[in-house]
Image (cartoon, rainbow, N blue to C red):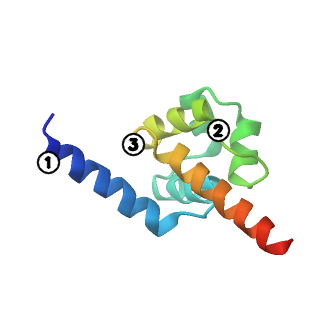
Amino acid sequence: MSLFWLCRKHSFINNHIDIIKGIHPGKFIERELKKKNLTQRALAEETAIPFQTINAIIAGRRNLTTEQAIKLDKALGYEEGFFAILQTHYDIAQYKDKELAN
C-alpha cells in the first residue's frame, strides 16, 4: 500500500467526519437506513446487534461500543473505524457542552 493512497484515504475519512462531527451516530445511521431502504430489524440481523440496541442507538438513547461500530462500518459499507470516530467526536462535543454549562 503506497503512502499516497494512505494519505488520500485518511483525507477522505477526515473530510467526511469534519462535515458530520458532533452528530450522534444514531442520526447518521437512521439516514443511511433510509437511503439504502433498510429497516432497523434488517440491520440488527446483519450485524447481530439486538434490535432493541439498534433502536436505542438510532433514538440517541445509547452510544456505540467499538464492537458495534465495527459491525456497522462493515454492514453499511464504511471504512473500518468510521462510526467509532463519529462516536468519539460526539462524546467530545457532549463533554464540551457540559463544561460550558458549568
Q: Nearer the viewer, mark 3 or mark 2?
A: 3
Residue drawn 42% across the image and 38% down it: 80
Residue closest to the eye, 59 or 96 = 96
Please give the label number shown on residue 4.
1
**Residue 61: % across, % down:** 79, 51
Single out the mark in the foreground, 3 or 1: 1
For the residue labelled by badge 3, is the local secondary structure a helix, a strand or a loop? Answer: loop
Q: Residue at x 65, y 58 (%)?
A: 92
Say whether disc 1 or disc 2 marks the residue closer to the N-terminus.
Answer: 1
Q: Secondary structure at mark 1?
A: helix
Residue topped by disc 3: 77
Query: Residue beneath label 2, please?
Result: 41
Image position of 67 (left or right of 50): left
Residue 68, position as x, y percentages in the image: 60, 34
Q: Residue at x 46, y 52 (%)?
A: 36
Please report whichever mark, 3 or 2, sits nearer to the chain's N-terminal start: 2
Q: Is residue 50 above or below residue 10?
A: above
Q: Residues within 10 Å of mark 1 (few under 14, many from 20)?
A: few
- 83 left or right of 2 in image: right
Query: Would you identify the image quadrant in which residue 84 lies?
Result: top right
